Image (tube, grey):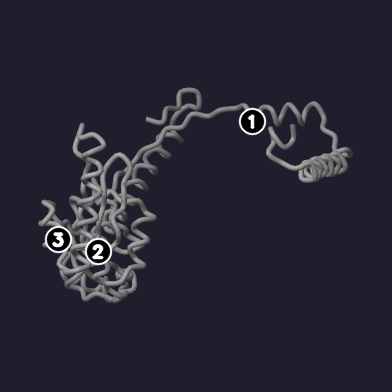
Amino acid sequence: IIQAALKSGPREFEESIRQSLLIGKLYDQITSSVSLTPEQIAAEYQKRSEKIQCSSILFPLNDYKKDASASDEEVKNYYQEHKDDFRKSFSIDVEYVQLDFPKDGGVQKEVEMKYKAKAIFDTYAQNPDFKAAATKQGFEVKESGYFSKEDPNFTMGWTYELLLEAFNMAENEIHEPIEIPKKGYLVFKIKGRKNAYLPELTEVQEKVKDVVISKKAQDTALSKSKEILAQIQEKWSQTDAATRNFT
């Protein structure tokens, strides 16, 4: 029974039972001297059973971002003070071909996609022109644009594991065709690799501007929330306890 049902050997089973007995004895030893009064039990029951109802007010950041602005000088100063926040991590650019299975194409069409994917791979190996190899089989090459491990490009529909695998490939290296169950085949190559670097302001200006605007919006939202809180507290203090209402 142990071997068939529990997938364990007698020795391993005995050791697991021995550990359970030891833990049980240890628990009894520690808790045997502990006692609780009925009042303590009732208090703990009430603590675990009682419920509360809360009301809240949300101050959406986007509601305040639309009224905020950032001058070129503000953007420049913020970038100078927070350069490391905008440092670019190691990134790659991928070219890929997605060979989808035709709808209602049957097994024959799926096998055909497999051979077309292999043909693209083999053609590139002989002549490293990925677009020409894909066009020859009637497919279009798509490009991911540069992305990093910290900011992966999920718009391609790849798994995170596959994206990480791409980072281990050399520039211009092509990956063997990958079958995507119930979907098709994927062939991709590494078009470019960029080491980590600190970009110039012109490259990240819009991102810096958005950060500055977001921070201004946060300050406005915080100020507004404090203003509303003060009004609530004042009204709360002036209202009879029996008729208090958060609104």
Residue marked by disc 3: 133
N-terminal of the two: label 2 or label 1?
Answer: 1
- 42 up-or-down from 227: above or below: above
Residue under the image location 10 percent in, 57 percent down: 136
Residue type at mark 1 is Arg
Kindly identify which numbered label has been placed on residue 189.
2
**Residue 48: mark:** 1
Give the amino acid at mark 2: Lys
Query: Which of marks 3 and 2 precedes in the sequence?
Result: 3
Residue at image position (35%, 51%) is: 159
Q: Label 1 crowding class (10 Å Cα cut-off): few <14, some 14-19, many 20+?
A: few
Q: Position of residue 119 (x, y in %)?
A: 20, 56
The quadrant of the image that shows the C terminus is top left
Viewer-nearest of labels 2 and 3? 3
Give, as a three-letter code, the residue at label 3. Answer: Ala
Mark nearest the camera among 3 and 1 is 3
Q: Classify mark 2: helix, strand or loop.
A: strand
Between marks 2 and 1 in the image, the one whose residue lies nearer the viewer: 2
Q: Give how far across and how far down residue 208 sits, in percent.
A: 24, 65
Crowding near pointer 2: few (<14 within 10 Å), some, many (20+)?
A: many
Marks 2 and 1, how far apart at CA: 57 Å
Left or right of 36 on screen, residue 150: left
Q: CA distance from mark 3 to mark 1?
A: 67 Å
The quarter of the rendered structure image containing the N terminus is top right
Q: Is residue 84 left or right of residue 202?
A: right
Q: Secondary structure at mark 1?
A: helix
On the image, which quarter does residue 161 sit in? bottom left
